[in-house]
Image (tube, helix red, strand yellow):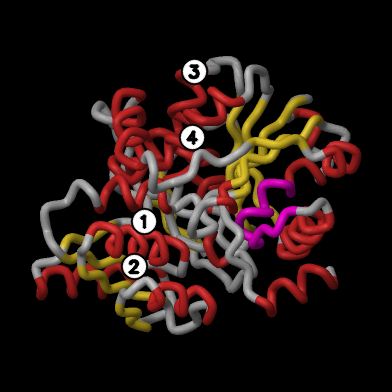
């Protein structure tokens, strides 16, 4: 079941390379300039030249630190509130700790225990509420209004997107020649930032999104040319479960993203196992970037392909499941 929003294409006149380069300056020394490495094992497996942009090597093992720190460092308020399935909350909690701000994170009742523990280890309060992203966001915004805190949106914010765009900036600087970049898609903040930078610096390169079949909002949005709200089903890729793209992300994706792939649970688990066997610990949401290269559609993607391995915060339970897939 899905619901369409006739929102049109949202313009983002204040989000471009200038904003991404400014974000790169703000996050320098906090977020890592993560490596790109070729994987001979995955290249042999897929028949492509596979390069991995290892965001799982961030201090908190996930790309979210880029956008979260960029935004949190810009707000005047001394306290912040976030809504998250886990990784955005970890990033905001980490950023708030570095900046001396108080932090609360609304997480789902079904949140991965290890991610909640990390949020609390960074000094933030974890508030379990609801099961859907819309429920969490409503609760977080209510808390922000009541306390005077700044609400840090996980993806529908130009400063967050600019921060995520530094990943694409680095890809274009680190690898001289590539045909395509494949990016996992939750709410669209990462792919919209990456595609903005990649298309500006490597206009001929393609950018593709990969999401779970449990929440195919990018696939449907590109097909229908409008924002689509889906009803997410449970998935091993909890970071890919927002019910809709953010309006800002949709506007950028509509103009700059070349296609999307919706992966099954079995494909995501297999990709996680293959990534681990190749020597890289990736959570299912990050390993999902490999799924299109293991599919029958892989030839249309290109020869030299960069996979954004967006995170490495995998629970013990999911690690066991992935290795058995």
Q: Nearer the viewer, residue 248 or 26?
A: 26
- Residue 102 drawn at (x, y percent): 21, 70
- Residue 133 drawn at (x, y percent): 40, 68
Kindly check if marks 2 and 1 are in contact, taking CB atoms under 8 A apart as contact: yes
Marks 1 and 3, how far apart in space? 25 Å
Q: Nearer the viewer, residue 47 or 316?
A: 316
**Which quarter of the picture shows residue 42?**
top right
Secondary structure, mark 2, is strand
Q: Residues within 10 Å of mark 1 (few under 14, many from 20)?
A: many
Mark positioned earlier in the residue sequence (4 or 1): 1
Q: Residues within 10 Å of mark 2 (few under 14, many from 20)?
A: many
Q: Which residue is mark 3?
A: 201
Mark positioned earlier in the residue sequence (2 or 4): 2
Q: Residue furthest front?
A: 29
Q: Is residue 81 above or below residue 175?
A: below
- Residue 256 drawn at (x, y percent): 48, 28
Marks 2 and 4, how far apart in space? 22 Å
Q: Which residue is mark 1?
A: 154
Marks 2 and 1, how far apart in space? 7 Å
* Mark linked to residue 194: 4
**Which quarter of the picture shows residue 274?**
bottom right
Secondary structure, mark 1, is loop
| Residue at figure coordinates x 43%, y 35% from the top left | 166
Q: Which residue is mark 2?
A: 83
Q: Is residue 184 left or right of residue 110?
A: right
| Residue at figure coordinates x 20%, y 46% from the top left | 74
Q: Is residue 23 left or right of residue 216?
A: left
Secondary structure, mark 3, is helix
Q: Which residues are magenta?
A: 280-291
| Residue 50 located within the stretch drawn in magenta | no
Kindly check if marks 1 and 3 are in contact, taking CB atoms under 8 A apart as contact: no
Q: Is residue 197 left or right of residue 97?
A: right
């Amino acid at each position: 079941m899905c619901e369409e929003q006739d929102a049109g294409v949202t313009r983002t006149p204040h989000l471009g390379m200038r904003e991404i380069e400014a974000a790169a300056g703000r996050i320098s020394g906090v977020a890592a300039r993560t490596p790109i490495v070729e994987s001979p094992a995955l290249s042999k497996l897929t028949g492509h030249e596979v390069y991995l942009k290892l965001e799982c090597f961030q201090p908190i093992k996930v790309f979210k630190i880029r956008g979260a720190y960029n935004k949190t460092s810009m707000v005047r308020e001394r306290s912040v509130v976030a809504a998250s399935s886990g990784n955005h909350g970890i990033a905001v909690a980490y950023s708030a700790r570095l900046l001396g701000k108080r932090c609360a994170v609304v997480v789902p009742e079904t949140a991965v225990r290890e991610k909640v523990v990390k949020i609390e280890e960074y000094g933030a309060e974890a508030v379990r509420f609801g099961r859907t992203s819309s429920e969490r966001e409503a609760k977080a915004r209510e808390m922000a209004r009541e306390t005077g805190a700044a609400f840090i949106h996980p993806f529908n914010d130009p400063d967050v997107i600019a921060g995520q765009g530094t990943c694409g900036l680095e890809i274009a600087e680190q690898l001289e020649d590539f045909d395509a970049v494949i990016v996992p898609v939750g709410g669209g903040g990462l792919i919209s930032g990456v595609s903005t930078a990649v298309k500006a610096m490597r206009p001929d390169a393609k950018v593709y999104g990969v999401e779970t079949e449990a929440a195919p909002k990018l696939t449907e949005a590109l097909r229908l040319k409008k924002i689509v709200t889906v009803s997410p089903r449970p998935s091993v890729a909890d970071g890919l479960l927002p019910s809709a793209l953010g309006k800002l992300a949709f506007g950028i994706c509509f103009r700059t993203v070349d296609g999307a792939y919706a992966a099954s649970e079995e494909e995501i688990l297999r990709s996680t196992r293959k990534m681990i066997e190749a020597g890289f610990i990736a959570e299912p949401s990050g390993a999902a970037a490999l799924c299109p290269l293991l599919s029958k559609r892989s030839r249309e993607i290109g020869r030299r392909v960069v996979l954004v391995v967006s995170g490495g915060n995998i629970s013990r339970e999911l690690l066991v499941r992935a290795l058995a897939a």
